[in-house]
Amino acid sequence: MADERMRRTPRQKYGEELKIRRLAADMTQEALSDGVVCSPTLISHFEAGRRLPSPVDAQRIDLALGTDGFFTRWLTDLDGKYAQHFAFVAEFERQATKLRHFSLSLVPGLLQTRAYSQEVLRTFHANYSADDIDRQVVNRLERAQTLDNPEGPVLWCLVDETVIRRQIGGPRVMADQLAKIAGMAEAGRLRLHVLTFAGGAHALMESMLYLMSFDDAPPIAYVEGLHTGHLMDDPAMVRSCRTAYDLALGDALSHRESVALVRSVAREYEDDAR
């Protein structure tokens, strides 16, 4: 059976607590919806974790249930800064003692510069507002602060050569981005390994992979696709993911060779930017 923490998102926890408090107050969904001034169906969505109430709705829930601002205060911690499928990943990486990331085409979010992140996020949206992009960039940069802590998790990054060769945002953006990665690797905050084109096929060609290890909990694995992600805690699945990572790592350049390659490509971008 999957660990309970894998199966309940923060929104679902909010909804489950709402249902518990509603039943404790001996209220039906219809009765609560009258107090909130919404449909019973919307209350059902709240309780299932499919939707979050607005701040006004949360205030009305507190008034109807007599919960003294409980759901209003909790809502501020569920501001949707991350996509729902990624919310738990963001929580777990702060608790992890070791992070091992494989990236197939993009610089991992924890390592992205502001300019690189802006270009990536703009590309993901056909219609976007500058404010929305700025908010997402800030969220991504805040995640990266976990690496500023000397007692934070050890980070291993295994990247396909595509990550450093695909020009995102132009040569100036790429030069700065690769300089940041190389600098972190040289400073001991990052173990870096590149899977080169010359190496041919490797065990992680089909997907990105994120492995997280903890002192007081079993390891977990995460894979992500377009608008979706899958968090795994089943021991057999996690072992299989770790084996694939180890196989790919065995085909990669050494840390020293990888840093040298990234520095070399960064210089090429520097030349193009002049």
Image: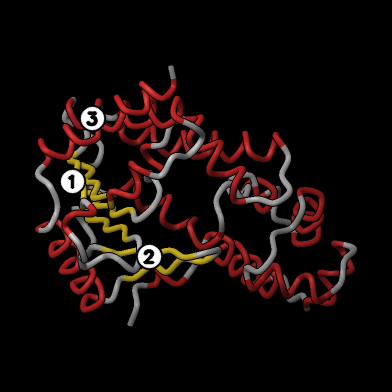
Q: Quadrant of the C terminus?
A: top left
Is 153 in front, or is 2? 153
Instruction: Determine contact: label 1, label 2, CB under 8 Å.
Output: no
Is residue 228 left or right of 71 when viewed as pictured? left
Rendered image: mark on residue 223 = 2
Quarter assignment of residue 60: bottom right
Question: Which residue bears the numbered disc 3?
Answer: 264
Q: How far across and how far down the image is residue 27, in percent?
A: 77, 75
Instruction: Determine contact: label 3, label 2, CB under 8 Å.
Output: no
Q: Callout 3: few (<14), some (14-19), or many (20+) C-alpha neighbours within 10 Å?
A: some
Q: Between marks 3 and 1, how big is the CA–CA gap?
A: 15 Å
Residue drawn at x 21%, y 68% is: 203
Q: Amino acid at mark 3?
A: Ser
Q: Amino acid at mark 1?
A: His
Question: Which residue bears the numbered disc 1?
Answer: 193
Q: Nearer the viewer, mark 3 or mark 2?
A: 3
Residue drawn at x 85%, y 62% is: 36
Residue drawn at x 21%, y 51% is: 196
Q: Residue furthest top?
A: 274
Q: Between marks 3 and 2, how big is the CA–CA gap?
A: 30 Å
